[in-house]
């Protein structure tokens, strides 16, 4: 990708995520969580879909841009509140992505496509949305499964993994089964897959 618009949009998204007050350790370095996750999802998209479109790659980079700006507890408890929170976040991600792409010089059609992708509606009907969903699930498994598994009993984590795998394509599931997951993660994943 040598397009200067692409580089400018990536830099703008990365700058927005650099303010994340939450951190994650990646390869021994403490990083802003959403900035690191954005890079990982971006890399997963490139592995899953070589030659991915710029709107897809930019949506991958912006999939959780400024996620911390709407705390989970701002929408109350329960499934309906959780889904409302997730919808509100997707609108933040789309708006931030639009701003970054517009400032970089992208046209309306490319921006609208990237916004559609970052909202992740109906992945089964759109291969690029499904690729993004697969990449996000893979990064969750790789970076958060061990922490989540440490807080929940085995039955609950297997249920979460089954729900995660239902969102994934067969190619995404195959990629998940190739992950080197620490702390019994692979066994949990195999159990959830019914293997």
Image (cartoon, rainbow, N blue to C red):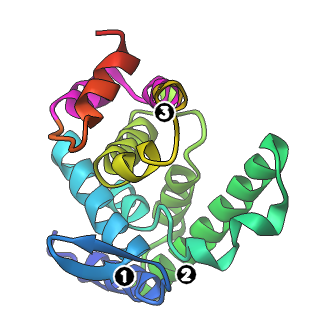
Q: Name the spot of residue 94 as percent of width and height, x first.
A: 59, 66
Q: Quadrant of the C terminus?
A: top left
First in sequence: mark 1 or mark 3?
1
Q: Quadrant of residue 108?
A: bottom right
Task: Answer few, some or many: residues within 10 Å of disc 1's Cα (few below 14, many 20 plus, some between 14 and 19).
Answer: many
Using the image, tell me which numbered label, if any, was put on residue 157.
Answer: 3
Q: Secondary structure at mark 2?
A: helix
93 w.r.t. 118: above or below: below
Which residue, given by chain and number where applicable, does mark 2 sit on?
99
Residue drawn at point x = 55 percent, y = 59 percent: 115
- Magenta segment, which residues? 160-178
Residue 156 can be seen in this image: yes
Going from N to C along the chain, the mark reached first, 3 or 2, is 2
Q: Sequence order check: which comes first, mark 1 or mark 2?
A: 1
In-image side of 139 versus 28 (left or right): right
Residue 125 visible from this viewpoint: no
Q: Tell me where residue 161 sits by quadrant.
A: top left
Horizontal relation, residue 31 to residue 157: left or right: left
For the point 66% across and 63% down, the residue is 89
In the displayed structure, 124 sits above or below 141; it is: above
Residue in the picture at 30% in, 31% down: 172
How far is the residue under mark 1 from the one under mark 2? Answer: 13 Å
Label the magenta part by its dominant secondary structure: helix
| Residue beneath disc 1 | 14
């Amino acid at each position: 990708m040598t397009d200067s618009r692409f580089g400018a949009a990536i830099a703008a998204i990365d700058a927005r995520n650099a303010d994340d007050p939450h951190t994650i350790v990646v390869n021994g370095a403490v990083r802003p969580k959403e900035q690191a996750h954005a890079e990982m999802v971006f890399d997963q998209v490139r592995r899953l879909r070589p030659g991915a479109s710029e709107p897809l790659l930019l949506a991958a980079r912006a999939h959780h841009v400024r996620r911390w700006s709407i705390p989970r507890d701002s929408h109350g408890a329960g499934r309906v509140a959780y889904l409302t929170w997730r919808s509100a976040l997707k609108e933040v991600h789309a708006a931030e992505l639009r701003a970054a792409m517009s400032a970089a010089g992208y046209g309306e059609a490319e921006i609208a496509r990237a916004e559609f992708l970052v909202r992740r509606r109906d992945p089964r009907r759109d291969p690029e949305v499904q690729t993004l969903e697969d990449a996000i699930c893979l990064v969750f498994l790789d970076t958060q499964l061990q922490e989540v598994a440490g807080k929940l009993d085995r039955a609950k984590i297997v249920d979460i993994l089954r729900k995660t795998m239902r969102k994934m394509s067969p190619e995404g599931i195959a990629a998940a089964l190739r992950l080197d997951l620490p702390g019994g993660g692979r066994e949990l994943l195999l159990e959830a897959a019914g293997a």
